Amino acid sequence: MKTVVLAALAGGLVMFLTESVTHMMTPLGEAGIRNLPNEDAVLPALRANVHEPGFYMFPGMDAQAKTPEGQKAWLQRYVAGPTGLLIYHPHGEQPMTPRMLGIELLTDILAVLMAAWVATHGATYWRRVAIVASFGLAAWFSIEVSYWDWYGFPAAYTLAQLVDQVASFALAGLVVAKIVRPRAMAAAA
């Protein structure tokens, strides 16, 4: 178990550093993301009408949308558009705080911890690398493809996340596969 934890720490750090590079030094970090047109006109309307931070969907589904008539009215608004999602912080916040970076590092370590534990079942070095890399592919299918499908996330963003997630797990896998050993070999040692 110590080697799995050590592999998770080392692999999680590699993943964190890989994601830092892909998000800050390559176009992957901005793929599919656009600036809000006419921001100077839109932001005052948001400030005047949206006072609580949150994750907003529009058109919204209020209590009336739970009735058959309300659902029909909501569907008409949705089809007519516009539709969208908004992550909103009315008072702003600091980007890339130590807290945010710490949470990112911790979640990377925890993700690699699960992958490292499963990788102990891989008989060869490259099989263990593939096991860890497959966690990135599984996460992409489960999360990013769903966001593309259900919420209309841009295809460029979704494909950039594929590269980012699989590459970061694969590079972490190179480290993990060196540290963890197959369970049968570890039991014999």
Image (tube, rainbow, N blue to C red):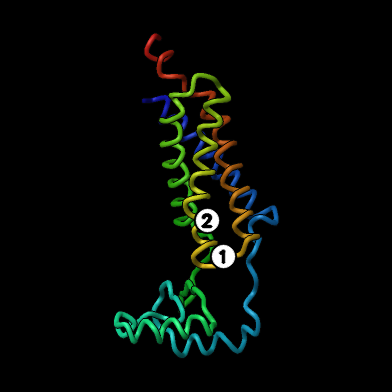
- Where is residue 91? Give x, y as percent: 46, 78
For the residue marked with disc 2, what is the amino acid? Answer: Glu
For the residue marked with disc 1, what is the amino acid? Answer: Phe
Image quarter of the N terminus: top left
- Where is residue 82? Give x, y as percent: 54, 82
Q: How many marks?
A: 2
- Label ID, residue 110: none
Q: Earlier in the sequence, mark 2 or mark 1?
A: 2
Q: Secondary structure at mark 1?
A: loop
- Where is residue 26? Give x, y as percent: 70, 53
Left or right relative to 156: residue 122: left
Please name the residue shown 45% across and 31% down the image: 116
Above or below — where is 162 with respect to 51? above
| Closest to the observer, 73 or 174 | 73
Image quarter of the C terminus: top left
Please name the residue shown 44% across and 56% down the image: 99
Circle 1 is placed at which residue position? 153
Left or right relative to 100: residue 174: right
Bin the neighbour count of mark 2 within 10 Å (Cα to Cα): few under 14, some 14-19, many 20 and up: many
Above or below — where is 95 with respect to 40? above
Please name the residue shown 49% across and 19% down the image: 123
Q: Quadrant of residue 171?
A: top right
Q: Secondary structure at mark 2?
A: helix
Please name the residue shown 40% across and 19% down the image: 183
CB contact under 8 Å: marks 2 and 1: yes
Q: CA distance from mark 2 to mark 1?
A: 8 Å
- Where is residue 167? Give x, y as percent: 61, 42
| Closest to the observer, 8 or 95 | 8
Bin the neighbour count of mark 1 within 10 Å (Cα to Cα): few under 14, some 14-19, many 20 and up: some
Above or below — where is 24 with respect to 106? below
- Label ID, residue 144: 2
Q: Quadrant of residue 110?
A: top left
